[in-house]
């Protein structure tokens, strides 16, 4: 079993003065791991532990998430801003080229970061991700768009009540299981401890931060960028992912020239937590094949 590599932590000041929290583990070629909306570094725990034995593994908290505060100017809670944070962290650490991994919304962020600075990317690993609005077809229906619109309207009318209910729902035992299902966990494969960590993480995010970024996620369409990606890419999908159905990953696979496509058996939206050894083995094989 891999030993736990000590982490180095720090903050760097992004373009608008927001202090961005990051962690670094290990030595070697750099890997940047970017989680999804209202997620947390724990989503990458198995990859961090395994790959930090041979690589420099870098993770960061997105603006408005956990140790990274909400920017003073809330207009800077955007996909562009977070993409600039990712690029800025690489520059802060003196990294000129790296492997970038994104999960879920993290894929959109990396697509935009690539659009801004393609020369920074040595290769890409995209897990259960999407380049355009994932709500179209989420859970096999388009009703999620309507639910989001209702939530946004309710928050606008009753912000304190909505925020209170949001936190209560996320942190009670029944709500934790609902959060797990909505977040795409496989309850048979993922430990309940990880689900608890996720639920508490969800509750810690300010409601308007979530709603604002979620709306940006719905509106962003990076499909045209995919045609321009010319670095090696591995697209991973979960066989039973209902949050972001396989067709979203298939679109990326078809549009990113020379990319590889891998389906995780029994994997859901959090395939890297469901089947970590299987996913790690496939990623490691990919990195070796592309000479990284």
Image (cartoon, rainbow, N blue to C red):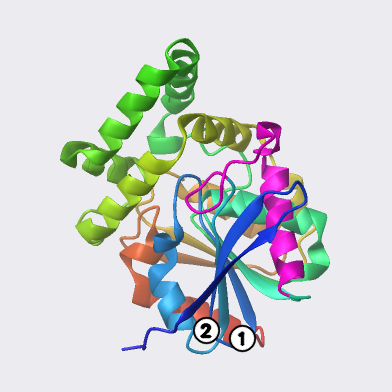
Question: Quick check: 91 above or below 167?
Answer: below
For this rendering, which residue is in front, 116 or 225?
Answer: 116
Q: Position of residue 181 (x, y in %)?
A: 29, 43
Label 1 environment density (alpha carbons within 10 Å; few <14, some 14–19, many ≥20)? few
Label 2: which secondary element:
helix
Question: Where residue 289 is drawn, which disc sits there?
Answer: 1
Q: Position of residue 249 (x, y in %)?
A: 55, 53
Q: Residue at x 43, y 14 (%)?
A: 154
Residue 231 in view (yes/no): no
Quadrant of the image occupied by residue 197: bottom left
In reply to whether residue 72 is colored magenta, the answer given is: yes
Residue at far top of view: 157
Q: Position of residue 71 (x, y in %)?
A: 64, 41
Question: Where residue 280 is drawn, which disc sits there?
Answer: none
Q: Residue at x 76, y 61 (%)?
A: 229
Q: Residue at x 46, y 10 (%)?
A: 157
Label 1: which secondary element:
helix
Q: Which residue is mark 2?
A: 285
Disc count in the image?
A: 2
For this rendering, which residue is in front, 213 or 158?
Answer: 158
In reply to whether residue 85 is colored magenta, the answer given is: yes
Question: Quick check: 287 above or below 243?
Answer: below
Question: What range of the chain is rendered magenta?
Answer: 64-93
Using the numbered discs, state the Cα–Cα distance from disc 2 to disc 1 in whole angstroms. Answer: 6 Å
Label 2 environment density (alpha carbons within 10 Å; few <14, some 14–19, many ≥20)? few
Q: Are marks 2 and 1 in contact (CB under 8 Å)?
A: yes
């Amino acid at each position: 079993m891999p030993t736990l590599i000590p982490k180095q932590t720090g903050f760097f000041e992004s373009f608008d003065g927001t202090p961005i929290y990051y962690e670094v583990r290990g030595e070697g070629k750099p890997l940047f791991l970017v989680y999804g909306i209202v997620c947390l570094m724990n989503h990458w725990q198995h990859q961090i532990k395994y790959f930090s034995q041979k690589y420099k593994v870098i993770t960061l908290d997105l603006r408005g998430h956990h140790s990274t505060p909400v920017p003073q100017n809330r207009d800077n809670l955007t996909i562009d801003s977070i993409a600039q944070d990712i690029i800025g962290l690489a520059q802060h650490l003196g990294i000129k080229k790296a492997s970038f991994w994104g999960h879920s919304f993290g894929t959109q962020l990396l697509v935009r970061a690539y659009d801004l600075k393609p020369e920074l990317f040595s290769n890409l690993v995209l897990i259960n991700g999407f380049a355009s609005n994932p709500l179209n077809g989420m859970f096999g229906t388009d009703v999620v768009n309507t639910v989001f619109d209702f939530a946004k309207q309710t928050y606008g009318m009753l912000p304190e009540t909505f925020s209170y209910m949001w936190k209560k729902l996320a942190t009670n035992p029944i709500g934790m299981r609902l959060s797990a299902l909505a977040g795409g966990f496989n309850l048979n494969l993922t430990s309940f401890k990880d689900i608890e960590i996720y639920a508490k993480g969800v509750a810690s995010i300010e409601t308007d931060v979530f709603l604002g970024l979620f709306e940006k996620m719905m509106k962003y369409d990076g499909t045209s960028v995919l045609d321009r990606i010319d670095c090696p890419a591995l697209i991973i999908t979960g066989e039973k992912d209902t949050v972001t159905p396989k067709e979203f990953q298939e679109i990326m696979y078809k549009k990113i020239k020379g990319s590889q496509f891998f389906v995780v058996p029994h994997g859901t939206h959090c395939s890297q937590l469901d089947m970590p050894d299987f996913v790690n083995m496939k990623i490691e094989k990919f990195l070796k094949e592309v000479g990284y």
